[in-house]
Image (tube, grey):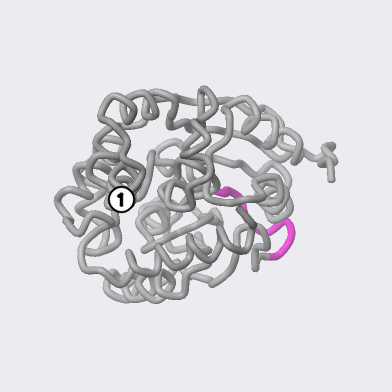
Amino acid sequence: MKELQIKNMVRNSYAKIAMRKGSCCGNTALADDISKGVGYSENELNTIPEGANLGLGCGNPVALATLREGETVLDLGSGAGVDCFLAAERVGKNGKVIGIDMTPEMIKKARENARKGNYGNVEFRLGEIENLPVDDDSVDVVISNCVINLSPDKSKVFLEAFRVLKQGGRLMISDIVLLKELPDFIKDSIEAYVGCVSGATIKNEYIETIKAAGFQEVKIISETSFPIECMANDPTAKAIIEGLKISPEKVKEIASSVVSIKVYGVKLVSVVPHK
């Protein structure tokens, strides 16, 4: 699949999600249940504006980012703003949160949610995570939740994250990776790419890509199996399963190859990334 084709498919799919009422699944309660299953607390979900949680994440990077008062946080692929709003509570009025998303409809939805919740320390910018509209050495923490796997150029994403972080800045992301290669019919499916599966890479390769960008102290904080419920309830996954006539047994086998990881890294002074 060509890079531009992938980006257009991802953008169009997430635009449709942004314009639907409710969540990715068309059901706010289901989105909350999925989010609780990957690390969000009920209290967190109750504090954010209605419509901010679309049930698209695979973890809760904010919970592990050890955010501090006054810090500047950048969220890669911010969607409707759920992680930005949670981060805003942690950095306080003296801090700042910037959300980046390449889908205009998502940016519009996130800005509406920010107005509803009166989040004066949060802003959303339209842009691609491979080319961040953010200054060099300007943020303290980069977070992301199940988005980098959608990028066809992950090395560029991590180089950009390294660029915008201040010296000593931290990377804390949740994402989907593979324990083994997927069948060709899944890897070649654009729908599967949009559904976060086909774009995922082997776990060790993913970690090495982060290190190659210049990050040090890179480590996996936690690793969990990809919830089969996400594949069973997600409309994109349903379309893949039905369109490719995948048996229930094969679905379980594919799901067993996919894991959600939380990864930490830090930008240190003496490191020069590999171009």
Q: Reply above or below: 93 against 153.
A: below
The residue that label 1 is drawn on is 239
Location of residue 226 by image quarter: top left
Is 266 displayed left or right of 120 in the figure? right
| Depth check, front residue: 57 or 48 | 57
Residue 209: give x, y in percent of width and height. Answer: 69, 36
Q: Is residue 66 visible in the rendered structure shown here? A: no
The picture quadrant where one finds residue 24 is: bottom left
Which is nearer the eye, 22 or 98?
22
Residue type at numbered disc 1: Ala
Q: In front here: 92 or 161?
A: 161
Residue 137 falls inside the magenta stretch: yes
| Tally of numbered tags | 1
Residue at 27%, 74% in the rendered image: 116
User: Where is residue 160 drawn, in percent x and y?
Assistant: 70, 53
Residue 195 seen in render: yes
Residue 240 in the image: above or below residue 177? below
Q: Residue at x 21, y 68 (%)?
A: 21
Residue 55 on image: x %, y %: 29, 50
Residue range highlighted in magenta: 135-142
Q: Is residue 85 left or right of residue 271?
A: left
Magenta stretch: includes residue 110: no
Mark 1 crowdedness (10 Å alpha carbons): few <14, some 14-19, many ≥20:
some
Give coordinates of residue 41: x percent, y percent: 24, 40
The vertical placement of 24 against 116, above or below, is above
Question: The residue tagged with tag 1: helix, strand or loop?
Answer: helix
Residue at point 48%, 33% (across, down): 262
Task: Tell me the residue at 24%/50% (across/down).
Answer: 45
